[in-house]
Image (tube, rainbow, N blue to C red):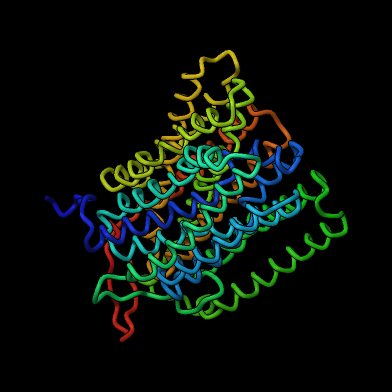
Amino acid sequence: MSSDTLNLFSFRGKIKILHLTWVAFFITFFAWFNHAPLLMAIAKSLSLSPDQVKTLLILNVALTIPARIVIGMLTDKYGPRLTYSLLLAIGSVPCFIFALADNFVQAAIGRFLLGFIGAGFVVGIRMVSEWFPARQLGTAEGIYGGWGNFGSAAAAMSLPTIALFFGGDDGWRYAIGLTGVIALVYSVIYYFSVTDTPKGSTYFKPKKIGAMEVTSTGDFVLLLVMKVPMYAALALLTWKLSSGVNLISSLTASLIYCGLVVLYLLDARKTYSINREVLSNPPAPVHRYKFKQVAVLNLLYFATFGSELAVVSMLPLFFSETFTLDPVKAGLLASAYAFMNLMSRPAGGLISDRWGRKPTLLILTAGLALGYFAMSLIDAEWPLYLAVAAAMACSFFVQAGEGAVFAVVPLIKRRLTGQIAGMTGAYGNVGAVFYLTVLSMVSYQTFFLVICATAVLGFTALLMLEEPEGQMAEVLPDGSVSMIDVA
């Protein structure tokens, strides 16, 4: 077997780490989207209005925006083994909170806190990048992301049946509570089963923690610009909660807006503090990286993963309302969209490894724009099988695009991989908040067209991406320089 081939039937060395890590990611998504296939039962049990249901969808992705940034920093500092284990354990708590909710406010709190577990994806990106060489990295990251992402489809397929098994009005509570138990148990298994790096390898850590390092003044300005949409997404969520469902008062919303402005200014100040030395004394060319690479990947993940989060959340309702289906059947059909993760995301990484990162992204981004345009045309006149086929075809380009994005992320700067993955991942959630807010105000058809338009913008930005080549430099503890292949 060639060195470029992964023996996925093995359970040793790096393949063991890959399997254990994608399972951890699978469980985070299984728990994070435990509500989507049960929304109709939850709404009936808690007497929720349609606006309140849509608000829960937005809340589910809100906390993940700052969480992915923070978790990325913690991963780079303390290692993926400890970070992933703690995230799974802590993330189980909101599952129990949501399962025990008796009204909209309690459910909203549980749903908001559950966004924390959605940051788990970032941790595995760093773990996999430590164990696999560049020539296999796209494929390995694609398998990690694709098989782990299938957790949302598994939830859609299994949780309605589990709820029916327990039966009664509280069946959905037992199903959601079970996801918390699984996360808690696996947190212990993961901690005692993995290591951060292969034996003898160095785990490179950032020089400072608290903000991302850059290597030029222009990159510093661009970093500050790219932080704005993340705060804007939280402001958008606040607006929705105050004017949409009146969950918070206008005064509270105004205070939150002011707080977000202050937080951004403090964040900018901290970023300057971390990078002050670099701005006055730029590092040698061998130690530099281009932040524009990160900015382009952020925009692409906004359109790919952001749209997937939004569509996975709304697709059961879309099929149910468009084709008048019962919740279980609608959930099973909608799971076809996420089901494609099993092959699509690994395919995106594999194609990137074989034929280049940038060409792959260009083709896949164009494909997802066309896919969402096709989905905007779906109505009750369509044969159901054709609508499901259109959703699956669209999802291939979306998820393969995600795999291709994270085939590039670990090749930018090794010691910052967690933070870069965190920011890029956060942009996926920024996209989800944006798209779900749009969904709350427009028809399903317009919703899909808006995603199509943002994909076109992402394609334009992609033209500025540079194909990773050569080597990146990292400094060993003894001061010597280690060169890491990126091609």
- Residue 181 vs residue 143: left or right? right
Question: Above or below — where is 102 with respect to 375?
Answer: below
Question: In this figure, what is the number of numbered marks?
Answer: 0
Look at 43% across and 29% down and name the residue there: 393
Task: Pinpoint residue 447: horizontal percent, then vertical percent.
Answer: 63, 32
Q: Is residue 235 in sight in this rendering?
A: yes
Task: Pinpoint residue 336: horizontal percent, then vertical percent.
Answer: 45, 32
Instruction: Work out which residue is located at the far bottom of the displayed protein and give it.
Output: 478
Question: Above or below — where is 48 with respect to 465?
Answer: above
Rendering quarter of residue 317 = top right
Instruction: Work out which residue is located at the far left of the displayed protein and give it.
Output: 1
Question: Above or below — where is 253 with respect to 172?
Answer: below
Residue placed most toward the observer, 131 or 415? 131
Task: Pinpoint residue 224: horizontal percent, then vertical percent.
Answer: 61, 63
Residue placed most toward the observer, 209 or 118? 118
Residue placed most toward the observer, 220 or 118? 118
- Residue 131 vs residue 36: left or right? left
Q: Is residue 457 in sight in this rendering?
A: no
Task: Pinpoint residue 234: horizontal percent, then vertical percent.
Answer: 69, 55
Look at 39% across and 69% down and name the residue there: 191
- Residue 391 vs residue 319: left or right? left
Residue placed most toward the observer, 366 or 234? 234
Look at 44% across and 24% down and name the residue there: 389
Q: Quadrant of the C terminus?
A: bottom left
